[in-house]
C-alpha cells in the first residue's frame, strides 16, 4: 500500500501556450495565482515526455496565495489545429477549491476565461455542500472552481485557505472506464474507487491521500482522439503530475528511466512519465517522507 504523503499527491497540471505573459497575467489578475518559478525545459525533461520540440522552451510555474505546493505549469507551445476542449480522451480539467464560487464567478465576467455554463454556479446532485462552475482558458485549459461549504461525506476534500486555492482533483476522460479504474488502482496502490451520483452516472472517483481526488469520466458519444503535433505535448491539459515516494517499480510502462531534473518544482528530485489507458500523459515526481 502506498504510504501517506505529507502533502497532497497532486503536484501540478500542465498546459501549453504560445503566450506565457498572457497566461501569467490572467492567472494573477483573475484567479489570484502567483508566479512561483520560471525557466526553460531541458532536453532530458522534454524527452521524458516524448516531446523533443519542447527543449529550450520557456515555462512558468503558478501557485495559489495559500502557498500550497500544488501548481499550474504553462510551457511555450503552438496552438493545435482541430483541438476542442472537453471533447477528446485524456486529461480535461483541473478542479480548484475556492472560498466563494458566486463572488468569483461574478468577477470573471468579461475575463479571458470562458464559462462553460454562462458563469452559473451549480450545486452537485450528490451533496448540498459542494457547488462549482467550469471555465475554459484561451489555451484550452479547463478549470472547475469549487466551493466546499462543509465536509462532503466519504470525500475528505481539503478546504480553501486562500480565495482561490489549490488543485484538489484531476479529471480524465476514458476510452474504457473499467480499464482505467484498474490501471489507476495499480498505479496508486488504492482500491477506493467510488461511484458519484449512482452507478448509472458512469462517473467514478478515487480518493488519494490528504484530500486529493482523481475523477474518471466516461466518454460522451462525440468524444474523439486528441490531435497532437509531432514532438509537442497534447493541447489543453497535457500532463497530470503526482507526488510519489516509490518510483523504482517494474509494473509500470515508463517512457524512460526515472531521472533527476533541475527545473522547478523538481529541485533535483527524480521524475518519470508514462501514458494511461486513454493516452493521457502521467508524470510521477519523487517525494520521500523524512
Image: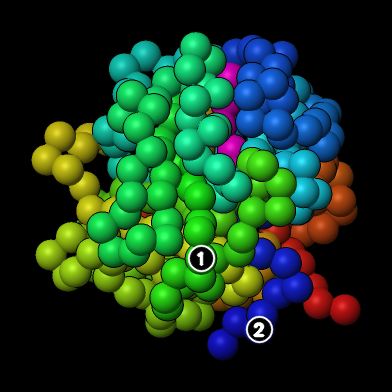
Mark seen at residue 3: 2
- Picture quarter with the N terminus: bottom right
- Picture quarter with the C terminus: bottom right
Q: Nearer the viewer, residue 214 or 189?
A: 214
In the image, residue 115 above or below residue 133:
above
Q: Residues within 10 Å of mark 1 (few under 14, many from 20)?
A: few
User: Quick one: SS at disc 1?
Assistant: loop
User: Quick one: SS at disc 2?
Assistant: loop
Rendered residue at 33%/43% (across/down): 122
Q: Nearer the viewer, residue 211 or 4?
A: 211
Q: Nearer the viewer, residue 288 or 27?
A: 27
Image quadrant of residue 48? top right
Q: CA distance from mark 2 to mark 1?
A: 27 Å
Residue 117 x %, y %? 31, 29
In the image, residue 164 above or below residue 3:
above
Q: Is residue 13 magenta?
A: yes
Image quadrant of residue 262? top right
Q: Nearer the viewer, residue 206 or 247?
A: 206
Closer to viewer: mark 2 or mark 1? 1
Looking at the image, residue 167 sits to the left or right of residue 202; the answer is right
In terms of sequence position, does the residue under pointer 2 or pointer 1 come before the other? 2
Rendered residue at 36%/74% (across/down): 193
Mark 1 lies on residue: 150
Q: Residues within 10 Å of mark 2 (few under 14, many from 20)?
A: few
Rendered residue at 47%/80% (across/down): 190
In the image, residue 162 above or below residue 22:
below
Q: Do we see residue 114 in this rendering?
A: yes
Rendered residue at 33%/24% (across/down): 118
Residue 114 x %, y %? 42, 20
Residue range (magenta): 12-17
Looking at the image, residue 265 sits to the left or right of residue 142; the answer is right
Residue 50 x %, y %? 56, 39
Amino acid at each position: 500500500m502506498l504510504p501517506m504523503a505529507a502533502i497532497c499527491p497532486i503536484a501540478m497540471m500542465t498546459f501549453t501556450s504560445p503566450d506565457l505573459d498572457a497566461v501569467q497575467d490572467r492567472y494573477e489578475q483573475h484567479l489570484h495565482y502567483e508566479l512561483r518559478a520560471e525557466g526553460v525545459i531541458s532536453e532530458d525533461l522534454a524527452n521524458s515526455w516524448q516531446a523533443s520540440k519542447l527543449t529550450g522552451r520557456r515555462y512558468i510555474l503558478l501557485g495559489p496565495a495559500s502557498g500550497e505546493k500544488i501548481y499550474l505549469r504553462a510551457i511555450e507551445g503552438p496552438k493545435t489545429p482541430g483541438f476542442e476542449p472537453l471533447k477528446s480522451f485524456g486529461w480535461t480539467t483541473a478542479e480548484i477549491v475556492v472560498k466563494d464560487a458566486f463572488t468569483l464567478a461574478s468577477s470573471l465576467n468579461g475575463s479571458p476565461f470562458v464559462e462553460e455554463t454562462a458563469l452559473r454556479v451549480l450545486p452537485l446532485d450528490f451533496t448540498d455542500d459542494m457547488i462549482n462552475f467550469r471555465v475554459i482558458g484561451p489555451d484550452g485549459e479547463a478549470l472547475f472552481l469549487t466551493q466546499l461549504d462543509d465536509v462532503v461525506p466519504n470525500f475528505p476534500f481539503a478546504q480553501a485557505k486562500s480565495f482561490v486555492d489549490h488543485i484538489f482533483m484531476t479529471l480524465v476522460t476514458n476510452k474504457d472506464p473499467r480499464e482505467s479504474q484498474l490501471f489507476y488502482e495499480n498505479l496508486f496502490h488504492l482500491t477506493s474507487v467510488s461511484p458519484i451520483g449512482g452507478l448509472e452516472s458512469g462517473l467514478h472517483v478515487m480518493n488519494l491521500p490528504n484530500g486529493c481526488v482523481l475523477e474518471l469520466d466516461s466518454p460522451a458519444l462525440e468524444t474523439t482522439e486528441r490531435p497532437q503535433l509531432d514532438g509537442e505535448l497534447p493541447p489543453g491539459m497535457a500532463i497530470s503530475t503526482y507526488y510519489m515516494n516509490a518510483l523504482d517499480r517494474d509494473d509500470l510502462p515508463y517512457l524512460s528511466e526515472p531521472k533527476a531534473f533541475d527545473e522547478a518544482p523538481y529541485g533535483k528530485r527524480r521524475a518519470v512519465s508514462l501514458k494511461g489507458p486513454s493516452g493521457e500523459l502521467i508524470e510521477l515526481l519523487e517525494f520521500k517522507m523524512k
